[in-house]
Image: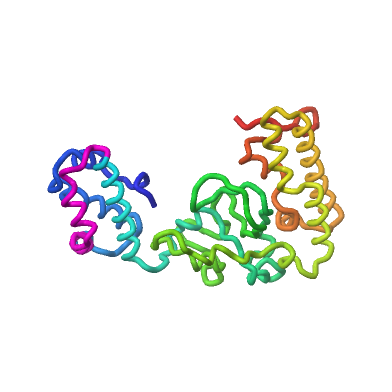
Amino acid sequence: MNSSTIDFDQELIQQALEGDWTQAERIWPGLLSRILAAVQSPARTRELADSLKQESWYQETAGAWGDLDPGERKQTWEDLTQRLIRAAYRTRPHCIRCGQCCSSGSPALLAGEAEAVRPGGIFHHKAYTIRAGEPVVNNLAGGVALALHELIKPLDPGGVCFFYDQGKGCRVYDDRPAQCRALACWEEPGGATEFEGPFLDRAAALEGQGLKLDYAAAHQARCPSSRIVELARAALQDDKSALTGLEEMIAFDLHTRLFAKDKGHLEEDELDLVLGRPVAVILKPLGLEVWEIQGRIRLRQSP
């Protein structure tokens, strides 16, 4: 949660910014009440507000308010809001299965969770691979970054974990991955060593499945993720040869998937685990999209 997602009367905030501290002190408990409701905390607004008023940072804020210029007051109010958010989360130090983390995508599986994607595992035929060097959305920092490691994740269509059921919560809660257990949304971000790995990769997930590993290796050799990113950046600078190279990669990627299915070597719902995401999907956050003209694959810059 951040301050922009809180539904609070902006006119009241403006009054707080323009008035003395007595005015601000009258208004911010209402903001705290909205925050407590948003994080589904059972805490009482007045009791939490009274405890916050005893903290040193609060006393310093109250004492300095009258000497702050408009810009400083705005920043101080934002700091106050962030402290209220953190305080509210601390009042519910347990998972209430609200779906906040589930709606930000699925977790990356750790090295010890290979059985989860193998036959009989809860994520069998319901997981996919992000190869090292591919563009991914960074949910913590925001924006798009390149994956530092190969990652295997449960499906997350539309950016929501496949196993999240709106209104009922996680459908595999008792068997949820280690990252889900470690992610405590009520705590301040940062310092979660659980997110550093080691992560599960295809070598471990597909151990003993020689044909699938052969497909993964052959596909990686012809469509390396680092080369895809390099060519995409060049293509966006009107490099025609780079564009042609990407179109050839897409054709090979599609052919490999069709061939593997037709021969019965891979099933439809394990293609993205064995081969990784389709090249066309990888290119989208890089600013390129696939289209077809007269039966031939073409690329164009995303609008």
Position of 176 with respect to 39 (left or right) is right
Which color scheme does this rendered protein use?
A: rainbow
Q: Is residue 145 left or right of residue 227?
A: left
Quarter where residue 116 is shown = bottom right
Residues 296 and 110: in front is 110
Q: Is residue 198 above or below residue 272?
A: below
Quarter occupied by residue 88: bottom left
Residue at image point 77% right, 41% down: 250
Count of residue discs: 0
**192 up-or-down from 130: above or below:** below
Question: In the image, is residue 154 part of the stretch drawn in magenta?
Answer: no
Q: Is residue 121 visible?
A: no
Q: Nearer the viewer, residue 123 or 135?
A: 135
Which sits in the foreground, 97 or 5? 5
Residue furthest right in the image: 263
The quadrant of the picture occupied by the C terminus is top right
Residue depicted at 49% across the width and 53% down the height: 140
What residue span does the magenta drawing correspond to?
A: 47-71
Residue 29, horizontal then vertical, whole percent:
21, 53
Residue 126, given in percent of the width and then of the height, sits at 66, 60
Q: Position of residue 141 (x, y in %)?
A: 49, 50
Quarter residue 119 falls in: bottom right
Instruction: Residue 102: tell me if it is visible.
Output: yes
The location of residue 65, given as percent across then percent down, is 18, 46
Residue 220 vertical placement versus 42 (above, below): above
Reply above or below: 237 against 140.
Answer: above
Task: Report whether 238 appears left or right of 104.
Answer: right
Q: Is residue 273 left or right of residue 13?
A: right
Q: Main secondary structure of the magenta part?
A: helix
Q: Is residue 53 magenta?
A: yes
